[in-house]
Image: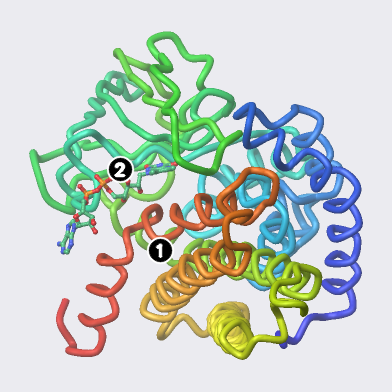
């Protein structure tokens, strides 16, 4: 078990109560209607879940990586889509400011984020630049005291509802890691446009949209980090967020395991509960072992980062994300199997868990890319 502080345990219990009361009753409806009610965002903001990372000095709850992992795991047990709301501002706003912003930028943005009413996202991926982030074409050219952004991004989570997007764009050069910079873009800016909302196999309720920048003017003070160093910033922020994808994977896997255990106790075949058959017992035991191993890896990564030890953050974050999401895919698939035909039906949550789990192997860098990161560390390659 992860070592939580008393404060974290109290927050976990409050989240658990909130999830049972507010989210479990509507989780299937969120999936079916592809819509999360707005009140859930406000509820999360009121509980501090949108702003967990904001330090107390700026009016926030002062959480750390362990806190964010704990919150995402807890919510994903019931709804992976809603778990994505917790920490929506981590990658798009708070982490970039904490690690790359100036004190002036922090003083401006963090108290706003602390109010829990600011929704943000991050825009990296483009139609021709997915795993190969450095191939991005969106450009920013300097014009007086502003930067002017032109280009297109795709699959952007929360892109249609975010107030602000952290947008990565090329400020010099044509290709490569150098010359990419990061900007906080007000989505109310002239020239910003949202395209189609993707229809997905899972994670329903979460909008994933194309966004277009037609000469969007961004004040120079909204550049986060140094000009041309955005790629490095992007990688560091992803390193700090990937363990939370691992945590959500642990949550969805635990949710599927819990459902499978209950079903194995109640469903009877051949005159006894199916949980009395050794074939299913071994499946459940394997599922439980995998979930515990994934949880241990995720929270060990978080523990190291929270202790200020970033020496292995990159490889540990990739391991946590990759291992836990592979576990989630296997465990949720096995949970459907434990349910038999009923598992394939929408009357039970396990088919939703299986569809939702898949995204964790794909976004924030596919698991192939995570394995490349890990192998490069092992081999001492750049
Ligand atoms: C639901 C969802 C939400 C998302 N949210 C966001 C968001 O908010 N912001 C954002 O910027 N992006 C977002 N993304 C984009 C996501 O990060 C990318 O889809 C992901 O990084 C993979 O890029 P790609 O889809 O272009 O796949 P590709 O890069 O085209 O990869 C296709 C396949 O090739 C493999 N591959 C590619 N290169 C290599 C290699 N060198 N070695 C081995 N295998 C390789 C990949 O692993 C994959 O299996 C989201 C995607 C989805 C589906």
Residue sitting nearer the eye, 145 or 66: 66
Q: Residue furthest front?
A: 270
Find residue 250 and report its image quarter: bottom right
Q: Is residue 210 left or right of residue 40?
A: left
Please give the label number shown on residue 181: 2
Please provide percent x and percent y for residue 381: 15, 82
- Left/right of residue 185 with respect to residue 10 in the rendered view: left
Q: Is residue 162 visible?
A: yes
Q: Residues within 10 Å of mark 2 (few under 14, many from 20)?
A: many
Could you tell me how far apart the alpha carbons at marks 1 and 2 are, in whole angstroms? 14 Å
Secondary element at tag 2: strand
**Can you give x and y, in whole percent of width and height, for residue 37 in the image?**
75, 28
Whichever of callouts 1 and 2 sits on the residue coming sooner in the sequence is 2
Residue pictured at 50% horizontal, 60% vertical: 99
Q: Secondary structure at mark 1?
A: helix
Is there any visible trace of residue 103 in the rendered image? no
Q: Quadrant for the C terminus, please.
A: bottom left
Q: In the displayed structure, would residue 160 be above or below residue 286?
A: above
Q: Is residue 39 left or right of 125 when viewed as pictured?
A: right
Instruction: Name the residue at 15% across, 44% down.
Output: 135
Q: Residue at x 63, y 54 (%)?
A: 342
**View extreme (top): residue:** 190
At a point 44% along the width and 55% down the height, the residue shown is 358
The residue where tag 1 is placed is 236
Label 2 near label 1: C-beta < 8 Å?
no
> In the rendered view of the protein, which quadrant contains the N terminus?
bottom right
Crowd rating for badge 1 (residues with CA inside 10 Å; few <14, some 14–19, many 20+): some
Residue 11 location (% of width, % of height): 86, 64
The circle drawn on residue 308 is none
């Amino acid at each position: 078990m992860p070592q939580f502080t008393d404060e974290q345990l109290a927050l976990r219990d409050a989240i658990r109560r909130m999830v049972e009361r507010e989210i479990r009753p509507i989780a299937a409806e969120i999936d079916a209607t592809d819509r999360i009610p707005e009140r859930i965002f406000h509820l999360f903001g009121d509980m501090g879940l949108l702003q967990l990372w904001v330090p107390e000095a700026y009016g926030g709850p002062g959480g750390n990586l362990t806190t964010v992992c704990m919150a995402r795991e807890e919510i994903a047990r019931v709804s992976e889509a809603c778990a994505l709301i917790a920490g929506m501002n981590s990658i798009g706003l708070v982490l970039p400011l904490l690690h790359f912003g100036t004190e002036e930028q922090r003083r401006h943005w963090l108290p706003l984020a602390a109010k829990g009413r600011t929704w943000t996202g991050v825009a990296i991926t483009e139609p021709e630049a997915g795993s190969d982030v450095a191939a991005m074409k969106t450009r920013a050219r300097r014009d007086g005291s502003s930067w002017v952004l032109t280009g297109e991004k795709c699959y952007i989570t929360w892109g249609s509802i975010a107030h602000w997007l952290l947008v990565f764009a090329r400020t010099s050069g044509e290709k490569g890691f150098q010359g990419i910079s990061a900007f906080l873009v007000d989505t109310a800016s002239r020239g910003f446009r949202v395209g189609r909302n993707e229809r997905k196999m899972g994670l329903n309720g979460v909008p994933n949209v194309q966004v277009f920048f037609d000469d969007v003017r961004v004040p120079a003070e909204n550049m986060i980090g140094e000009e041309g160093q955005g790629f490095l910033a992007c990688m560091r922020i992803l390193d700090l967020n990937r363990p939370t994808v691992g945590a959500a994977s642990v949550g969805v896997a635990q949710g599927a395991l819990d459902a499978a255990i209950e079903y194995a106790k109640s469903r009877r075949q051949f005159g006894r509960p199916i949980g009395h058959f050794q074939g299913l017992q071994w499946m459940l035991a394997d599922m439980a072992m995998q979930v515990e191993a994934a949880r241990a890896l995720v929270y060990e990564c978080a523990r190291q980062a929270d202790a200020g030890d970033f020496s292995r953050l990159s490889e540990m974050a990739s391991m946590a994300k990759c291992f836990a999401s592979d576990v989630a895919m296997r465990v949720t698939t096995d949970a459907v199997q434990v349910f038999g035909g009923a598992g394939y039906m929408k009357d039970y949550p396990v088919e939703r868990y299986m569809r939702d789990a898949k995204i964790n192997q794909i976004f924030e860098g596919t698991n192939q890319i995570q394995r490349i990161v890990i192998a490069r560390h092992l081999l001492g390659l750049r």
